[in-house]
Amino acid sequence: MIEVKDVRKSFRDKAVLKGVNFVFETSKTNMIIGASGSGKTVLQKCMVGLIEVDQGEILFEGRNLTTMTPEARKELRQQVGMLFQGVALFDSMNVERNVMFPLDMFTDWDIKKKLERVNTVLERVGLTGTNKKFSNELSGGMRKRVGIARAVVLKPKYLFCDEPNSGLDPRTSMLIDKLIHEITIENQITTVINTHDMNSVMEIGENILYLEDGISEWKGSNKDLVFSKHQRLNDFIFASEFLKDAKDMRALETRGIIDDNRDMNEILKEGKIEPGKDEKNDK
Amino acid sequence: MIQLSSFGKYLLMIRGMFHKPENLKMYWKEFMHQSVEIGYGSFGIVVIISVFMGAVSAVQTAFQLTSPFVTRETIALVVRDTVILEFAPTLICIVLAGVVGSKIASELGNMRVSEQIDALEIMGINTKSYLIGPKILGALLTIPMLVVVAMVLGIYGGRMAGALGGFLSADEFDRGLQDRFVAKNVWIGLAKAYSFSFIISSVAAYYGYYVKGGALEIGRASTNAVITSCIMILITDYLIAYFLL
Ligand SMILES: Nc1ncnc2c1ncn2[C@@H]1O[C@H](COP(=O)(O)OP(=O)(O)OP(=O)(O)O)[C@@H](O)[C@H]1O
Ligand SMILES: [Mg+2]
């Protein structure tokens, strides 16, 4: 569990995070959503200490990262895996060496045991047989999967993913989301994912933080999201008119107003389509 | 002011390097790798440059020494001393500032821009010690070796030029070579080589490690690294000559 309490961060005089509060839960895929530039990456980097916060607390199982000694921080980081927005594979090394690197550094296993672990992880992300390939020989999706493999090879307790499926087709995105979700549950990881991909949010968003202009504006699960009446959140999630309509329809359907046997025109005539009227309240 | 604060940052970077390695074996491997990259990688250019600079200094000294009061063997003596004291350490290191310095700066710059340095930090690795330390140590090990090679080859180049040009036979050259030899000169040459190796590698590492921005900045960083280390090499050269000779 990671608790973020009133985190603030400014660059020169530009305030990026203006008081973020959230609890990231263990064994769940926690998601940070928000418009481009809302501070998602900055928040994630603050949480792992790549950027120092100006104010606030970041508690890993109660231990405050912001006041830790450098040694304690280094130790904590050995339990952290991170997938960067640009993946950041070591381009002087092939896939196998990339994934093996954390093992080389932090274990005294022999090469056979290390290779075994590497191959297990590579198989887990569906990349068996790519061991000797270099970063520039891989597709974007493969690179992300190598990044995930490298992030989880040491069995981290915390996994950070910055836009794991940006720039990927919907199917590959879905596969990567599912992969992260499964790994999270298998190893009881506290996973934090930045995304603006609404497919992923709906698919694996168990615990969602909506950042707006550096403020934690809304919290809830993907189910809460569908029924949310938060106007700006809705405008953000259901950006297109089509999706807005679809959301309204979905709401009506769950309330039993729409069912497949009834004619749409009839419903419209009854004038019952006033979306959001008796939905449950936002948190 | 900016210069002063970056010098402070530079010193902090050097201090940040001194940390207990997370895994000594990996650091050793990286040190070996860097030594090969830096030393072996620039061997060819050092060979070519040193032979020619020795040859040129022989030809030019011969051209200038027209007085009947100086023996021709003096040419060898002059070649020997200039090569050992100045040409081998300074000229070679200026060239290496370009070859090695730009390589170090762009390698680190690329790692910074593509977040590879952050990725290492996240794993709990002290990137200053792991990335910069082996580079500086590798330079300190191999560049002085290259300078010694350059000293030998430079003198040999002078000997060859004399024989080929017909103005100084190999025998005369060898006699001149042993005339009034001061061992201290070699030590001064080496002192220069060590100082310059440190300048080349640490200045380049500084510019590369702290790159901000994109690919364009990497190019700018390596240019700045080369310019700054050349200037620092020349200033240090002057100071060493002034205080040690
Ligand atoms: N190192 C920095 N120095 C100055 N400003 C920064 C820095 N890093 C981020 N910012 C600013 O912080 C704001 C938030 O950036 P951030 O990268 O967190 O956005 P994001 O939510 O991740 O966006 P995206 O979805 O496009 O990745 C931006 O306005 C950016 O200009
Ligand atoms: Mg981002």
Image (cartoon, coloured by chain):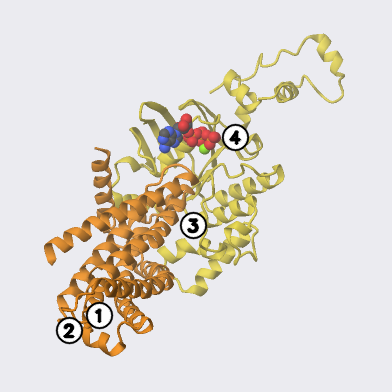
Chain colours: A yellow, B orange
Please check whether the numbered discs 2 and 4 fall on a single chain. no
**Looking at the image, which is closer to me, A120 or A186?**
A120
Please check whether the numbered discs 1 and 2 fall on a single chain. yes
Alpha carbons under labels 3 and 1: distance apart: 67 Å
Mark 4 vs mark 3, foreground winner is: 4
Alpha carbons under labels 2 and 4: distance apart: 78 Å
- A162 displayed left or right of B161: right
The disc numbered 1 marks a residue on which chain? B
* Circle number at residue B179: 2
Alpha carbons under labels 3 and 2: distance apart: 69 Å
Ligand 1 contact, mark 4 (Cβ < 8 Å): yes
The disc numbered 2 marks a residue on which chain? B
Please check whether the numbered discs 4 and 1 fall on a single chain. no
Asked if residue B76 is positioned above or below residue A113 in the image, the reply reads: below
Amino acid at pointer 3: Lys
Q: Considering the numbered disc 1 on the image, is that residue within a helix, a strand or a loop?
A: helix
**Could you tell me which residue is drawn at 45 percent across and 45 percent down?**
B217
Residue designated by label 4: A196
Q: Earlier in the sequence, mark 1 or mark 2?
A: 1
- Near mark 4 (Cα within 10 A), the count class, few <14, some 14-19 or many ≥20, is many
